[in-house]
Amino acid sequence: MTRAESHLVFAAGESPNTFIEELPVDLEELEPNVQEDDISETTQAHLQIAVPTPDGPVGHSPHTLMRDDVFEDVDDGRGTVFGTQTHEFAERYVLEGDVEPSNDDERHINSFIDSLDGELRVEEDAYLPLTVDGEQVTISGIIDLVHIRPDTVEIIDFKTDLGRHAEDEYRKQLSVYYHVLNDWFSSREVTAGIFYTAQEVRVDIDPLSKADLVALIGQDQRSEASVIE
């Protein structure tokens, strides 16, 4: 509305709402002039577009650092839908409180969250800028849960895996989050851990250094370049 230079047109159906009716203008009733289309064939048009390479940092997610083959031989996985529902329950329980768990995983999350006595933040955006081979790179992800106390900050990532086969790969993900929060809360001790919702087990993670993350990204980018060549 604020971009109109000289005229502003409002349109309503047969029953205008209160906003339209209370405008200090005369309403004009128009009969739509709709004509039947006599085209018997449709022609598919192809849009030709060139997508330019954006200037600025290259974007990565923590998952691009992780190997997918660790999940290939897993026969007892419960799927992404179950994982998404479990994470959504954790978020709703922190934000709303009055949410009833529907399975054992959610009950375990319920008990775990109730045991925390600090400030809780859920689905926290995290961005870690790094320089890889002279190029600016940003790794961005979402932290499931941040538990903030006066002297400590705890990163928790919920995993619905029935085993711990992917823990080394998850370590890469948690390491990104660790360095982001270590910059945010430089005066507090920052720790990172995985909470396995099925076993109700919390596992501390020893984070990789920023140099290790840079090496992983560099290796990944060189592998992609060799495939393209």
Image: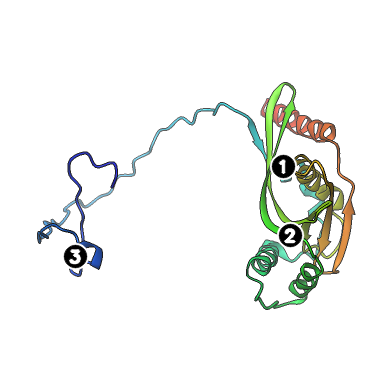
List the residue tagged with mark 1: 64
In space, the residues marked 3 and 2 are separated at their CA atoms by 48 Å
User: In the figure, 132 relative to 111: above or below?
Assistant: above
Look at the numbered disc 3 and give the secondary structure of its residue. helix
Compare marks 3 and 1 and give the one earlier in the sequence. 3
Look at the numbered disc 1 and give the secondary structure of its residue. helix
List the residue tagged with mark 3: 21
Q: Residue 117, how many percent across, how many down? A: 79, 65
Q: Is residue 214 visible?
A: yes
Task: Name which quarter of the figure residue 148 lies in.
Answer: bottom right
Tag 3: Cα neighbours inside 10 Å, few (<14), some, or many (≥20)? few
Instruction: Name the residue type under label 3.
Output: Glu
Kindly check if marks 3 and 2 are in contact, taking CB atoms under 8 A apart as contact.
no
Residue at image location 72% in from the left, 42% down from the top: 64
User: In the figure, 59 relative to 35: above or below?
Assistant: above
Compare marks 1 and 2 and give the one earlier in the sequence. 1
Instruction: Name the residue type under label 2.
Output: Glu
User: Relative to the observer, which residue lies in front, 112 or 74?
Assistant: 112
Task: Name which quarter of the figure residue 47 lies in.
Answer: top left
Instruction: Name the residue type under label 1.
Output: Thr
Compare marks 3 and 2 and give the one earlier in the sequence. 3
Tag 2: Cα neighbours inside 10 Å, few (<14), some, or many (≥20)? few
User: Relative to the observer, which residue lies in front, 227 or 63?
Assistant: 63
Q: Is residue 10 left or right of residue 75?
A: left
Kindly report which numbered mark, 3 or 1, lies closer to the viewer in this rendering: 3
Find residue 119 and name its label: 2
Q: Residue 170, how many percent across, how many down? A: 81, 50
Kindly check if marks 1 and 2 are in contact, taking CB atoms under 8 A apart as contact.
no
Image color mode? rainbow
